[in-house]
Amino acid sequence: QVQLVESGGGLVQPGGSLRLSCAASGSISSINAMAWYRQAPGRERELVARITSGGSTNYADSVKGRFTIVRDYAKNTMYLQMNSLKPEDTAVYYCNMFVRTPYRVVGSDYWGQGTHVTVSS
């Protein structure tokens, strides 16, 4: 089994920063893409940032220039550095990884449990 464990959420004032972490553990052969999603109350889950196994990144227009996604290949961990936070960034943030295990030919999507980010004064 594979588990993703998130950390780093919390309450921050507008203009502040937070760093989210997501660590994968278990029987992992390889990890392809990693991504952060978020879901605000009453809204659908949306892609925030994504990083491929080769290190290519893409971001939602709403976070470009403010958020940075980074992965640590050795630790099977990714981070989301969030700067210049705005109230509209308030949401539950979920990490997602496409993981291959020794037990299946094809990989599967795995999700973290979600971490709350609240941006408010």
Image (cartoon, rainbow, N blue to C red):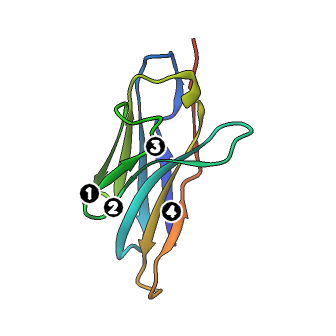
Callout 3 crowding tier (Cα within 10 Å): few <14, some 14–19, many ≥20: few
Question: Mark 1 vs mark 3: which is more N-terminal?
Answer: 1
Question: Mark 4 vs mark 1: which is more N-terminal?
Answer: 4
At label 1, which amino acid type do we have? Answer: Gly
Residue placed furthest toward the right: 42
Callout 2 crowding tier (Cα within 10 Å): few <14, some 14–19, many ≥20: some
Name the residue at 46% across, 43% down.
60
Instruction: Report the residue marked by disc 4.
Output: 3
Instruction: Report the residue marked by disc 2.
Output: 52
Question: Mark 2 vs mark 4: which is more N-terminal?
Answer: 4
Alpha-carbon distance for marks 2 and 3?
A: 15 Å
Name the residue at 45% across, 62% down.
97
Alpha-carbon distance for marks 2 and 4?
A: 19 Å
Choose top left, top right, bottom left or bottom right for residue 112: bottom right
Q: Position of residue 87 (x, y in %)?
A: 57, 22
Q: Position of residue 53 (x, y in %)?
A: 30, 64
**Which of pointers 2 and 3 indicates the residue nearer the eye?**
3
At label 2, which amino acid type do we have? Answer: Thr
23 vs 12, left or right, is: left
The disc at residue 80 is: none
Judged from the image, the secondary structure of the residue bearing numbered disc 2 is loop
Judged from the image, the secondary structure of the residue bearing numbered disc 3 is loop
Alpha-carbon distance for marks 3 and 4?
A: 26 Å
Name the residue at 41% across, 22% down.
84
The disc at residue 60 is: 3
